[in-house]
Image: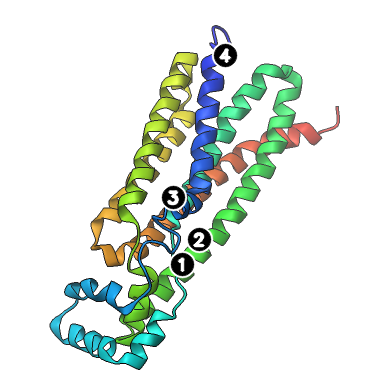
Amino acid sequence: MESLRTPFFILALFIMGIVVVIELGATAILSRLDLGGGNVAVATSEAIRDSLQFFPEDIREQLEEVLGDEEAAAELDEIDISDLPGFAIRYLALIDGILFFTVALIGVALLLPDNLQGKIQGVVTLVFSVLIILAAIAMILAAIAAVTTMVILLLAIPFGTLVYLIKFGSFPRGEASAVLGLLLLLKFGFVVSLVVAQQRFLQGKGLVLIILTSFLAVIVVSFLHGLVPGILVSITDAIAAIVVAVLAVIWAVVLLIGSIPAVFKAIKPA
């Protein structure tokens, strides 16, 4: 590709790599900062009393009655909250992983001869897209199971509701918002670096569309995090994760279909 400014292209690739790393390690990062991963709130009956204001009076009275029972409250205090959810930010790595892979392929194409790059790219893309599809489907099922569990607990008044509040009612929405803001900033840096490296990247409709999808995914997660009261964010976070994973499956299928002609060409006898 003529007039490619290689340092800026490498910078763009590096920035997107950082984005994927942050997304994959989001839960661990929040946990280390004592902002997530079970450290958001201490698992005691007192820690969830403020959440009762979001319930109707008759339900609130039932929940307060259980909290007033010393034996029941003690059982609630012993519930493990180490598996607090945090799906959506991690699931963003599916889409951004596809974006990183796409840009990396462009870089590889600059290094390989024309007669070789098509064959290699086709096979590598086929394998990558299949892996993404399988991983995304498994992650969708995990998120659906989490949503189902959380909704069942929330509606199982009173004890199930209290269990939900202890395990899932203190999602670190503010800290997740900060991480999402950082991701958006890095993605803007990626786009700027890519355009500076070569303006003709903007002419690639597929690349532009997947970049827009990457930004859209962050916006969807941010919107669903802010749509509901804090005690319900764990549920909408998992729903956002499902949406993100579905988008990733769609793009992986597009890659899979696009790789098939190159694969047939690669295996065709000379």
Tally of marks = 4
How far separated are the C-alphas under marks 3 and 2? 14 Å
Q: Which residue is mark 1?
A: 144
Of the residues shown, which amino acid type is indicated by label 4? Thr
The type of residue carrying mark 2 is: Ile
Report which quarter residue 103 is drawn in: top right
Task: Name the front one of labels 2 and 4.
Answer: 4
What x and y, as percent, mark residue 39?
A: 41, 62
| Vertical side of 38 occupied by 60: above or below | below
- Which class describes the residues within 10 Å of circle 2: few (<14), some (14-19), or many (20+)? many
Q: Quadrant of the N terminus?
A: top right
Q: Residue at image x 65%, y 17%?
A: 110
Q: Which residue is mark 2?
A: 140
Which of the 4 quarters of the picture holds residue 159? bottom left
- Which tag, 3 or 2, sits closer to the chain's start? 3
- Alpha carbon separation for disc pair 4 and 3: 30 Å
Between 51 and 42, the residue placed more toward the observer is 42
- Residue that mark 3 sits on: 89
